[in-house]
Amino acid sequence: MNYCSNPLQYHRRATREVNVGNVGIGNNNPIRVQSMITCDTMDTEASIQQTVELAEAGCEIVRITAPTVKDARNLEHIVKGLRERGCDVPIVADIHFKPEAAMEAAKWVEKVRINPGNYADSKKFAIREYTDEQYADELSRIRERFSPLVELCKRRGTAMRIGTNHGSLSDRILNRYGDTPLGMVESALEFARIARDLDYHEFVFSMKASNPKVMIAAYRLLVARLNELGPGWEYPLHLGVTEAGEGEDARIKSAIGIGSLLGDGIGDTIRVSLTEDSPHEIPVANALIQNISRTSNAERPTPNVQLSFDPFSYQRRATEKIELNGVKLGGGELIRVVVRRANFDKIAHKVDRMGDYKPEIVYEDADIREVDPRDDIALARINQSSTPEFVSVRDDVQLSVIAAFRLLAAKLQARHPILLKDVLSCRASVSDAKQNNGVSQKRPTDFLNTLLTASTTIGSLLCDGIGDAILVQGEEAPGQALRLSYNILQAAGSRIFKTDYVACPSCGRTLFNLQTTTAKIKAATSHLKGVKIAIMGCIVNGPGEMADADFGYVGGAPGKVNLYVGKTAVKFNIPEGEAVDRLKDLIREHGKWMEPAQQTVALEPAL
């Protein structure tokens, strides 16, 4: 199965066009930026104001939740108010659980988002075996529930997103396909086949997950399946990492998931989901799009090769273990963090106090074999070596970073460990390019772009299973580069060194203030290395997205919180004012609590 024409050369996937009001998605249209308002849908004025603010920030499509028929009916007033104020941004109704709400919303908006996992199913986490006949009966029931919406959208010219979420797959799908990317794809295709049978084609797909590895694999598998299905199945894709969280970690996680797919030419519209005010999402999304156009190698022909990894199933590249100055890498060891000598010297006096953020290998001391991955003679010499070598791509290679390292991994024998780089140029040589009376003049850098570039390139390759050590050389501040290195490893699920949080963005379904609540939970638990905590404003994706979390904090009712262990609710209707302390008690009960240790040396402030 092929998910892109050439994984070593950028080429945007060709799709049909889907029109959402006055905005075209797919085909020759630019990649569109979306977001979602956070207020109560019944607050008409606030909904209008937040939508206008998003449109003014550059958001091209705005989504509004419609959890009930009453909310869906109020979309009429919201849309009318927007148009009266001269705001023509298309509106998308976000639907979960209520087909009746979808039918009402489709009368007023330009697009309806439905989730196949809960549109016609009541999730019970039931375990049962479905015979083929029983499964067919379930599909007939879904067709009966879904067809009226399709017919209505077809009559009105309303677009649709068939948006699968990893955290809300139906029991039917989970029992047949498991909690897998394949299950996500099949869930969406069931609904797409119904739409196509009714000659309705104005829809896009999405395959969202909070785990970038799962999200990347699901989108790749979906594209491969659409390619297999043949002409007429070239539907556009909406990209997003759901429940990414806030701050630097959320931007890194989003860049790994969204950026890597955009780099492969996959994606026609994106949303960066932050647990922050929605307008903050727009510059990140725009920067990701601009970053792909800047770093892709569309103008540099690169031969296609047999990939060294399975793009649909993560497995770390198998290498032999080597040791460098007492540090082991490769062969299942931790993925190591490398720094240049110049940066190490700047922080050498405090390395012993840097805790988990310390540099582990100095580049100039590691005897690294730098090669151009197109140089078959140089690679043959390395492959003939009787002992494994530590190998990386030369800084002067004129290829995109992802293409260069994929090519290297394809040609290099698997026994040799690989050092990944974020950019193929040493910051020192770049920043010294301008001279003023013999004094080096460093170019100002935009840390957001540095972060997104490093996260996209290194994170994408880590999710491909490539890499035994990483070097961030696009950021010259040594502490900031180290923090970025470790945060990329954490976001990619490659190395856990701090508490991991899964936090959804706010929306009209949210039952508590996500930003302040997330801040309180982080203040109480950020010292719990390796513990994963999910913070969910409502039940829509809660249990499913918490499948690989240790503990969950979920809005159950206004002012009330339910606490989870994994995806099982264990404490119910806790008053919000007590919930953080009760969460700490729950962590203690399960033996994962420890008291905060003395702070180590602080690094540069986060984004």
Image: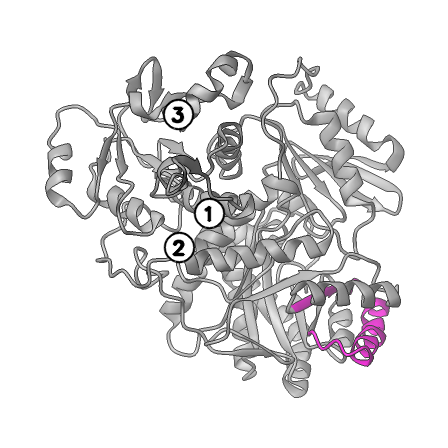
Query: Is 11 or 114 nearer to us in this picture?
Result: 11
Q: Residues within 10 Å of mark 3 (few under 14, many from 20)?
A: some
Q: Which mark is residue 453?
A: 1
Q: Is residue 46 left or right of residue 379?
A: right
Vertical order, 108 against 129 (above or below): below
Vertical order, 513 against 490 (above or below): below
Give SS at disc 1: helix
Q: Which percent across, then down, holds residue 123?
A: 68, 53
Within the image, what quadrant is residue 135 found in? bottom right
Residue 39 in magenta stretch: no
User: What residue lies at 81% left-to-right and 72% top-to-bottom?
Assistant: 75
Query: Is 232 or 142 nearer to us in this picture?
Result: 232
Q: Tell me which amino acid carries mark 2.
A: Thr
Query: Is 234 or 294 nearer to us in this picture?
Result: 294
Q: Which residues are magenta?
A: 61-89
Q: Tell me which amino acid carries mark 1.
A: Thr
- Quarter of the image containing the C terminus? top right
Of label 1 and label 2, which has the lower sequence position? 2
Q: Residues within 10 Å of mark 1 (few under 14, many from 20)?
A: many
Circle count: 3
Q: Which mark is residue 342?
A: 3
Give the image's coloring scheme. one colour
Q: Which percent across, then down, holds residue 486?
A: 50, 31
Residue 67 in magenta stretch: yes
Of label 3 and label 1, which has the lower sequence position? 3
User: What residue lies at 82% left-to-right and 39% top-to-bottom?
Assistant: 561
- Quarter of the image containing the N terminus? bottom left
> Which residue is under mark 2?
295
- Whether the residues at callouts 1 and 2 have beta carbons within 8 Å, the answer is yes
As measured in the structure, the alpha-carbon distance from the residue carrying label 3 to the one carrying label 2 is 26 Å
Q: Is residue 389 left or right of residue 20?
A: left
As measured in the structure, the alpha-carbon distance from the residue carrying label 3 to the one carrying label 1 is 22 Å
